[in-house]
Image (cartoon, grey):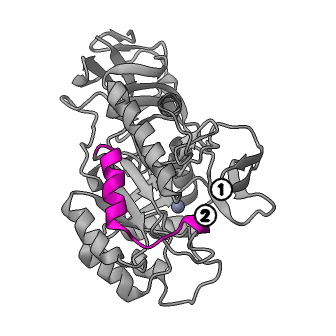
Amino acid sequence: MPIVLGRRYDTGEPCAISIENDRIADVSPVWPSGSLSDWPYVAPGLFDLQINGHSGIWYSNAGLTRDQVLLTLQAYFAYGVTRLYPTLITASHEAFAAGFAALRQACEQHRWASDMVPGFHLEGPYISAEDGPRGAHPLEHVRPADWDEFVKLQDIAGGRIKLVTLAPESENAIDFIKRAVATGITIAIGHTAATRDQIQAAVDAGATLSTHLGNGAHGTLRRHPNYIWEQLGEPRLYASIITDGHHIPATLMTSIVRTKTPYRTILTCDASGLAGCAPGVYELGSGRFELLPDGRIVVAGQQQLLAGSSLGTDTCVASVMRMAGVSLRDAIDMASRTPARLLNQPQFRLQRGSRADLFLFYLPPGATRLDVVATFARGELRYGELPTLTADQPQHTNSV
Ligand SMILES: [Zn+2]
């Protein structure tokens, strides 16, 4: 029975967490025998609702295979992520079909993969065709909302598409939203240039999230009203934000977190398939992209149009603390409990009975990312190892 020693992320208190099978059996306060600064923090596993791939593998690639999916999933344990929504962005129907089929196979073949992937995210293709709102999505595959196409994709995905990002102004979008919400799918507004009325119609129809608010937008906007203010001020919408340190400035990060509160703000890294790759120019099906040394990914040849991030969710947790003054507790909750709540998935906690998805990390002052040392998913050590620590009252030693 593993016993995990660490400082609770929410209170800072040292504790011993006993794991039995896939559950937390007990959480008890303890006294560190040595220095408390040697103790890592312990927190519930992170949950990122928007991951596009890793290690040069994109989920949107028509050639995606089951084994590639498994490779990418395994890589995310190193970031403290124990749950994620693989995300397919605007592509041809054939590419979607191949991608969802490969993702489904990975989940059906391995229990750990289906535990890690409680849903898929379809971002596009029913989005704005305008430059700016469209972001790096390929124009040739943008199309009106098509429920019949979606039903086919959902069938291929085995019913696992649980989140769809679309633009409310897309033709047929409001009807699409109503049908999707009726089947339990979460609808996000994103890659949009919608008017206030169109946004209100989408929310009235059941949309509950703004996807990466502040990105996927025009470079220059009318001061007000505009679609960023309209979504920011709409209390029925959660907002996801990419807090990798590059996608939005500190003041916008602060404004969104304070307005939506950590209860309705979700951190995502929107990691691209180039996450985990070396800096350089990469030729991909949809164009040429450059991974810069600071982790930004841009459409090659310019430095303005961001095309996802190469950084992980752990970086987003550290950045929102450093740049927006958010506490560790709130930052972790925005990357674990809040997305789970929005998506109607279980909220894992550091308490008896919770599924034992948790990770250990150090966070030196000013750090740009969490220094993840170990990740457990469903009670199994999936990444790293437990540091050697001892504690009194009661006596515990880390062992697995
Ligand atoms: Zn996007």
Name the kind of residue labelled 2 in the image: Pro
Left or right of residue 266: residue 30: left
* Amino acid tagged 1: Ser
Q: Main secondary structure of the magenta part?
A: helix
Q: Is residue 154 magenta?
A: yes
Identify the mark nearer the N-term, 2 or 1: 2
The residue where tag 2 is placed is 138
Q: What range of the chain is rendered magenta?
A: 138-158
Residue at 74 percent across and 46 percent down: it is: 282
Pick the residue in front: 5 or 293. 293
Question: Which residue is located at x 19 percent, y 29 percent?
Answer: 352
What distance separates the C-alpha of mark 2 from that of mark 1?
Answer: 6 Å
Residue 180: x %, y % from top left: 26, 63
**Do we see residue 13 in this rendering?**
no
Identity of the residue drawn at 52% across and 33% down: 72
Q: Residue at x 37, y 84 (%)?
A: 198
